[in-house]
Amino acid sequence: MSEMPSLSPERSEMEEGKRARLRRYQLGVTLALILVGNGILALTVWGTGVNLDRLVRFPEIFNPVSDVCLRFGWHDVSGSSEPVRLCNEWIQLADSSGETHKLQKETHIVQGADGKLYFDHGTRMGFPAFGLFALVVTVIGAGLALKRWLIARYRVRLGLAGKAC
């Protein structure tokens, strides 16, 4: 039987050195792309002026137990022939900012078959939120593709193409 020629210790050390350089390069590329990707996202959000607090709307609901009503108003109600008097503006006692909260204009009030009022607040997430989500997915996808390409290119340059590391 013929034996496979073993690698000389000198050659084995050279391969290990190349593999160590490749691992350091992979780590450096990963960290650089994380920083660059986050920078792109931060500059985009800052440059467009998107208010992240208002990106997704959460409906503000008057709670008569813990809120103080400042202004009442008459509202048309679907399912009822007469308008209903509801709180338009209120202060939440739990909110230390003292900001007033208002019934949103796009809120539709519906009277159910049981006689209770129900609030339809409409969509909570608008097109800017979907645009930001698409941007995040695009930046992540492009970063992963760039990372694979850079590492494959460096692997070929080191002469480790096709070898597992």
Image (cartoon, helix red, strand yellow):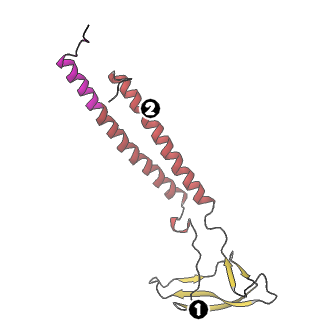
Residue in the picture at 48% in, 52% down: 41
Q: Main secondary structure of the magenta part?
A: helix
**Residue that carries the numbered disc 2 in the rendered image:** 149
Task: Determine the image quadrant of residue 29.
Answer: top left
Identify the residue at the far top of this view.
1
Residue in the picture at 29% in, 36% down: 24
Looking at the image, is 67 positioned above or below residue 107?
below
Question: Would residue 107 appear left or right of 4 to someone viewing this image?
Answer: right
Q: How many marks?
A: 2
Q: Quadrant of the C terminus?
A: top left
Question: Would residue 22 appear left or right of 57 to someone viewing this image?
Answer: left
Q: Is residue 2 located in the magenta-colored stretch of the structure?
A: yes
Circle 2: element type: helix
Residue type marked 2: Trp
User: Mark 1 packing: few (<14 Cα in 10 Å), some, or many (20+)?
Assistant: some
Looking at the image, is 107 positioned above or below residue 50?
below
Residue 23 has which mark? none
User: Mark 2 packing: few (<14 Cα in 10 Å), some, or many (20+)?
Assistant: few
Q: Nearer the viewer, residue 121 or 35?
A: 121
Magenta segment range? 1-21
Residue type marked 1: Cys
**Residue that carries the numbered disc 1 in the rendered image:** 69
Residue 94 locus on image (x, y percent): 46, 85
Residue in the picture at 47% in, 49% down: 40
Q: Nearer the viewer, residue 164 or 146?
A: 164
Circle 1: element type: strand
Residue 56 locus on image (x, y percent): 56, 66
Identify the residue at the far right of this view.
81
Q: Quadrant of the N terminus?
A: top left
Looking at the image, is 84 positioned above or below residue 131?
below
Task: Determine the image quadrant of residue 164.
Answer: top left
